[in-house]
Image (cartoon, rainbow, N blue to C red):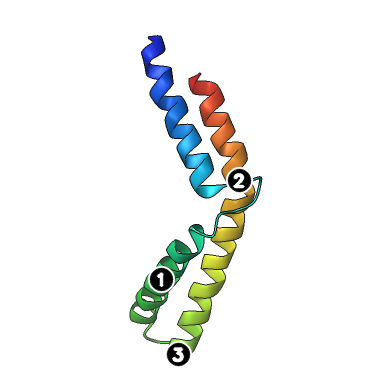
Amino acid sequence: MPSSFFSPLARIQIFLESFFYAADRISPRLLPAELVILLAEAALYMWLFRDCSKRKAALYALAANLASFLLGLYLAKPVWKFVVNTML
């Protein structure tokens, strides 16, 4: 690949790392996105799981979103490093 390809890729990596990570900690910018996802999931589960109570559906959405968020925190950096290392 031409070297001109790597410069934009490096800029994208630097932007994403500075946007979501700051000194090896998660940026607060992720929390509003997670809240929107939680509300959307809760609304969807309340609509899909009409047989159970709305509270159960909302708790299911909260548990699923929390598990997904925590797994994402655990895997984000290793997966990103793997992708960048295989592309460069």
Identify whether 11 is placed above or below 79. above
The picture places residue 29, in percent across and down from the top left corner, at 48, 58
Q: Of the two numbered discs 2 and 3 on the same chain, state the one appearing first in sequence.
A: 3
The percent coordinates of residue 55 (x first, y second) are 48, 88
Q: Residue at x 47, y 26 (%)?
A: 10
Amino acid type, mark 1: Glu
Q: Residue placed farthest to the left in the image?
A: 47
Residue to which mark 2 is pinned = 75
Q: Nearer the viewer, mark 3 or mark 1?
A: 1
Cα separation between marks 2 and 1 = 22 Å
Of the residues under marks 3 and 1, which one precedes in the sequence? 1
Q: Residue at x 56, y 72 (%)?
A: 63
Separation of residues labelled 2 and 3 (CA atoms): 33 Å
**Does label 2 or label 1 sit earlier along the sequence?**
1
Q: Residue furthest top?
A: 2
**Is residue 83 depicted above or below 22 in this figure?**
above
User: Residue 43 occupies which quadrant of the picture?
Assistant: bottom left
2 and 1 marks in contact (CB < 8 Å): no
Q: Quadrant of the N terminus?
A: top left
| Residue at the disc numbered 3 | 53
* Numbered tag placed on residue 41 in the rendering: 1
Please state which of the two labelled residues, at mark 2 or mark 3, is closer to the viewer: 2
Q: Label 3 sits on what residue type?
A: Ser
Q: Residues within 10 Å of mark 2 (few under 14, many from 20)?
A: few
The residue lying toward the viewer, choosing from 44 and 28, is 28
| Label 2: which secondary element | helix
- Camera-side residue of 67 and 16: 16
* 3 and 1 marks in contact (CB < 8 Å): no
